[in-house]
Image: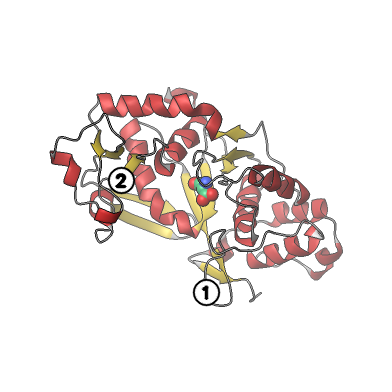
Amino acid sequence: MLSEHSQRYIGRFAPSPTGPLHLGSLYAALASYLHAKAQQGKWLLRIDDLDTFRNVPSAAPRIIEALQIYGLHWDDSIFYQSQHLASYHTVINQLLAQNLVYPCRCSRKSLANTPIYPGYCLHRQVETNTAHALRIKTTNITLGFDDEIQGQLIQSVAEQYGDFIVKRKDNIIAYQLAVVIDDYRQNISHIVRGFDLLDSTPKQLFLQQLLGYPTPTYCHVPLIVDQQGNKLSKQAFAQAVSLKNPEKTLYLLLTLLKQNPPVILKSASVPTMIQWAIENWQSQPLKKIRAINEGIH
Ligand code: GLU
């Protein structure tokens, strides 16, 4: 029912609750919030908690608390993916019925040297009464989009990634599919997120086209890297952002977002800083930047 999908700005922040927010994730959240609010848009919070193996029980409340302390107030109620399992399976069943996916029992080990899936299971009869993944049948069409910050990207999903997984062997809905379903369901018009997800975007475009969903506008902000150039990530045990003295971190983040905050803002409160940042937000200074060193500002 595409007609119900209005044109107004709706953005979102969709963290996976696998650990507390670190500087890099708060940076992306702030950019996404400011981009939405500078355009009088809504900003939604979605907790991407489908991966029960990686979820950390205390992470979601800690993320929520950090967003509140940093003055990033979301609109509407929080959406938890885990509360909508049936809806993902409905789409999976639809894809199965249309013969757009196929079962795959290849082990991760057997694919270790093949970054692009060679289609082993596409042409063989795979037992479906034991654990199996589902892969989408990709086609050789080229998909392009104009990222607001990173510029144009044109790729063929089939050539670049091959048939990718939409449901994992452990029955968990893969991120690529869940994100597309939810961005559609939540009427998301603008996706502002970290550069590390740029590579996922063509797969998401492919799924959107297959399912008849509109494609939102994308905007991939630089990654915050440490002195050695490594991405700050939970896997690399990046430190959780401090909840004490958020003004100091917020000022740093505005600097890393290249917003050029005036020195006088250093002594301002969180709401004042956020208000200034909304009124002065520009994505232009981040153009084509993929990574920013946390120590250089
Ligand atoms: N849940 C994903 C993550 O934390 C991000 C989803 C998205 O922004 O598309 O990496």
| Badge 2 amino acid | Phe
Which label's residue is closer to the chain start, 1 or 2? 2
Q: Is residue 76 visible?
A: yes
Across and down, in percent, residue 15 comes to 57, 46
Q: Is residue 205 left or right of residue 247?
A: left
Q: Are marks 1 and 2 in contact (CB under 8 Å)?
A: no
Q: In front: 192, or 82?
A: 82
Q: Is residue 265 above or below residue 279?
A: below
Residue appearing at x 81%, y 58% in the figure? 244
Please identify the quarter of the rendering in which residue 171 is found. top left
Q: Which residue has dot 1 on it?
A: 229
- Image quadrant in which the C terminus is located: bottom right
| Badge 1 amino acid | Gly
Report the colour scheme. Answer: secondary structure
- Image quadrant in which the N terminus is located: top left
Q: Which residue has dot 2 on it?
A: 164
Label of residue 98 in the image: none
Q: CA distance from mark 1 to mark 2?
A: 29 Å
SS of the residue at dot 1? Answer: loop
Q: In front: 146, or 241?
A: 241
